[in-house]
Amino acid sequence: MLKFDVFGKTMLVERKQNCWLLFVDSGRGMRTRVFDVVIPPELAQADLAVYLDDIFHEHSSERHPNVTSIDK
């Protein structure tokens, strides 16, 4: 599972059966699937942060100006 800071919100991306699945992480051990966003299955893992930035750019702020990968 890959973890990203998406403009201040922690989101998780999982690869399952050749599809990317997106989740919001509660920070308390729970996650909620995001069905409104479809990540193209052919998208490379290295391009996920840029894709999430493009999709959620309206949530950017001075405090959270971009999407970053969070290392586990």
Image (cartoon, grey):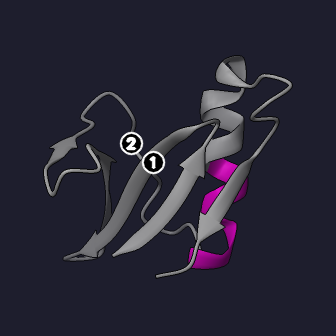
The local crowd at label 2, few if under 14, some if 14 to 19, many if 20 or more residues have their Cα within 10 Å, is: few
Q: Amino acid at mark 2?
A: Val
Q: Position of residue 39 (x, y in %)?
A: 45, 51
Q: Which secondary structure class fits the magenta region best?
A: helix
The residue at 68%/67% (across/down) is: 47
Specify whether 63 is left or right of 34.
Answer: right
- Tell me if residue 60 comes above or below residue 26 in the rendering: above
Specify whether 53 is left or right of 70.
Answer: right
Q: Amino acid at mark 1?
A: Thr
The local crowd at label 1, few if under 14, some if 14 to 19, many if 20 or more residues have their Cα within 10 Å, is: some
Magenta span of residues: 45-51
- Residue to which mark 1 is pinned: 10
> Residue 38 bears which disc, if any?
2
Q: Position of residue 54 (x, y in %)?
A: 71, 37
- Residue 22 falls within the magenta-colored stretch: no
Q: CA distance from mark 1 to mark 2?
A: 17 Å
The residue at 73%/54% (across/down) is: 50
